[in-house]
Amino acid sequence: MSKLVIVGTVAFDAIETPFGKTDKILGGAATYIGLAASQFKVDGAIVSIVGGDFPKEDLKMLEENGMDITGLEVVEDGKTFFWSGKYHNDMNTRDTLITDLNVLADFNPQVPQKYRDAEVVMLGNLHPLVQLGVIEQMDAPKLIVLDTMNFWMDSALNELMQVIAKVDVVTINDEEARQLSGEYSLVKAAQKIREMGPNYVVIKKGEHGALLFDDDDVFFAPAMPLREVFDPTGAGDTFAGGFTGYLARTGDYSYDNMKNAVINGSALASFCVEKFGPERLLNLTNSEVHQRIQQFKSLTQFDIKLT
Ligand code: AMP
């Protein structure tokens, strides 16, 4: 099993969906990534920052889920990153209402010495220069995966291009892939993003699944058709945590194994959306995950006789 370094926000979120509204609850990309990766019992570390207002029991919860938090800085007189978003009726689109960077504005990530030799690095959605700072502290990772969003394309595109050039896999949603590449076709968009540096591109399409692009091949994983979707927040990060957690667990970074990683990521993301915030990821059992992966299999398996 390989070590996994996760960098990203640990945050407070306030979310509104057609099914309800929350006050400040636990959120952040690294929270979702870490909880998803912990399903694979990996040796993972979260590199992040919170303020003194962040509940100590949530830090403990991350530790209890197997995450090393020595690289999670607590600024006692600072405030935790806060994000607020509102989903539209179709739940595939949302408006960001508030992004308060707070302690994140001066974040200088420190990867703990013990994790600098990690094979897998998951760069969650953050300022690209912070992502770059983490890459520079690593010895010789075998796989670097980057997630990003339109916020950074709008505010730090040059820096984002610098970090994209240094990673192996980019995970991005369809709208953002189009924005980054200037191409409407996702095939062309993936090709353009691959030309920016990474060998593989994962395009997440929300309730329409995810595509994994290699040189001249593409693999598709559907999203599980669910009876109820309460809150899509963190689904992309949960996918990334499942994807990298599985790869760190198996130590096999081939394209074929990435297909399995995409299925694991999709299965975990399908749980994430069933409740508000990361709640559904807590207490998720191995057998529930395995059952869902079986459902994924039968969703797309067919035996066609060509005439
Ligand atoms: P997702 O739904 O996968 O895009 O992830 C949602 C999570 O990303 C929330 O828990 C937020 O706290 C976090 N988030 C939202 N905006 C940003 C941002 N600009 N930078 C970093 N993290 C963010």
Image (cartoon, helix red, strand yellow):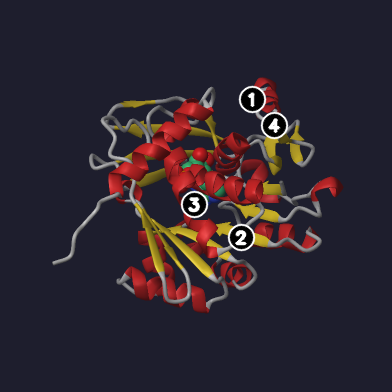
The numbered disc on residue 235 is none
Q: Are marks 1 and 2 in contact (CB under 8 Å)?
A: no
Q: Tag 2 or tag 4, which sits nearer the N-term?
A: 4
**Depth-wise, is mark 3 or mark 4 nearer the camera?**
3
Residue at position x 85%, y 46% in the image: 114
Instruction: Report, in whole angstroms, how far the alpha carbon at label 4 lies from the one at label 1.
Output: 13 Å
Q: Tag 2 or tag 1, which sits nearer the N-term?
A: 1
Instruction: Report, in whole angstroms, how far the alpha carbon at label 2 lies from the one at label 3.
Output: 11 Å
The numbered disc on residue 253 is 2
Q: Is residue 167 left or right of residue 76?
A: left
Circle 2: residue type:
Tyr
Instruction: Report, in whole angstroms, how far the alpha carbon at label 3 lies from the one at label 4.
Output: 23 Å
The numbered disc on residue 66 is 4
Of residues 246 and 228, the one nearer the viewer is: 246
Q: Are marks 4 and 2 in contact (CB under 8 Å)?
A: no
- The answer to whether any part of residue 244 appears in the image is yes
Seen from this angle, which residue lies furthest right?
Answer: 113
Residue at position x 44%, y 69% in the image: 180
**Depth-wise, is mark 4 or mark 2 nearer the camera?**
2
Residue at position x 49%, y 27% in the image: 287
Secondary structure state at the residue bearing disc 1 = helix
Q: Is residue 240 left or right of residue 70?
A: left
Within 8 Å of ligand 1, the CB of disc 1? no
Secondary structure state at the residue bearing disc 2 = loop
Q: Is residue 212 above or below residue 261?
A: below
